[in-house]
């Protein structure tokens, strides 16, 4: 996840061109094992959303806490979601 966070959607274009033409982004997952698709899609899509919505130059350390909270919220709603970044210890969602 931290590797994805380092991706710059405007890499290679000027700030003016980015602001004028980059309106959003998307996340795709190519996975050979269908049993892992849901668990990997949510954390990766959340990281992509964080990159698109956060100010340029944000840090992984700042984002990781928000993304971990999001994972816990998904779990509370019954949505399978794999860990964000380093594996979260059992009970880290307060249960």
Image: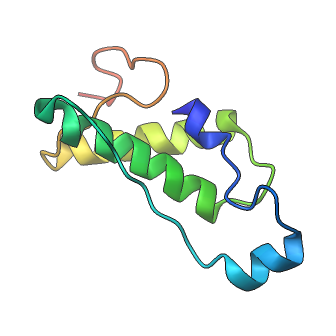
Where is residue 64, by image quadrant?
Answer: top right
Above or below residue 81? Residue 52 is: below
Determine the residue positioned at 32% across, 30% down.
Answer: 93
Horizontal and vertical percent position of residue 30: 31, 41
Horizontal and vertical percent position of residue 82: 29, 31
Of 35 and 12, the residue lying toward us: 12
Tell me the quadrant of the picture where the C terminus can be found: top left
For the view shown, which residue lies furthest in the bottom direction?
20
- The mark total stands at 0
Where is residue 20, by image quadrant?
Answer: bottom right
For this view, does 66 lie left or right of residue 35? right
Horizontal and vertical percent position of residue 91: 28, 20
Determine the residue positioned at 61% across, 79% down.
Answer: 23
Colouring style: rainbow
Determine the residue positioned at 77% across, 55% down.
Answer: 11
For this view, does 7 lie left or right of residue 47? right
Horizontal and vertical percent position of residue 26: 46, 62
Where is residue 33, by image quadrant?
Answer: top left
Of 91 and 62, the residue lying toward us: 62
């Amino acid at each position: 996840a931290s590797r994805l966070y380092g991706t710059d959607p405007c890499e290679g274009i000027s700030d003016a061109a980015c602001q004028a033409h980059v309106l959003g982004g998307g996340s795709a997952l190519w996975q050979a094992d269908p049993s892992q698709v849901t668990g990997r899609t949510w954390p990766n899509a959340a990281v992509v959303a964080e990159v698109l919505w956060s100010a340029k130059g944000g840090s992984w350390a700042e984002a990781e806490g928000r993304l971990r909270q999001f994972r816990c919220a998904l779990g509370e709603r019954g949505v399978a979601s794999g860990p964000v970044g380093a594996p979260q210890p059992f009970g880290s969602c307060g249960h």
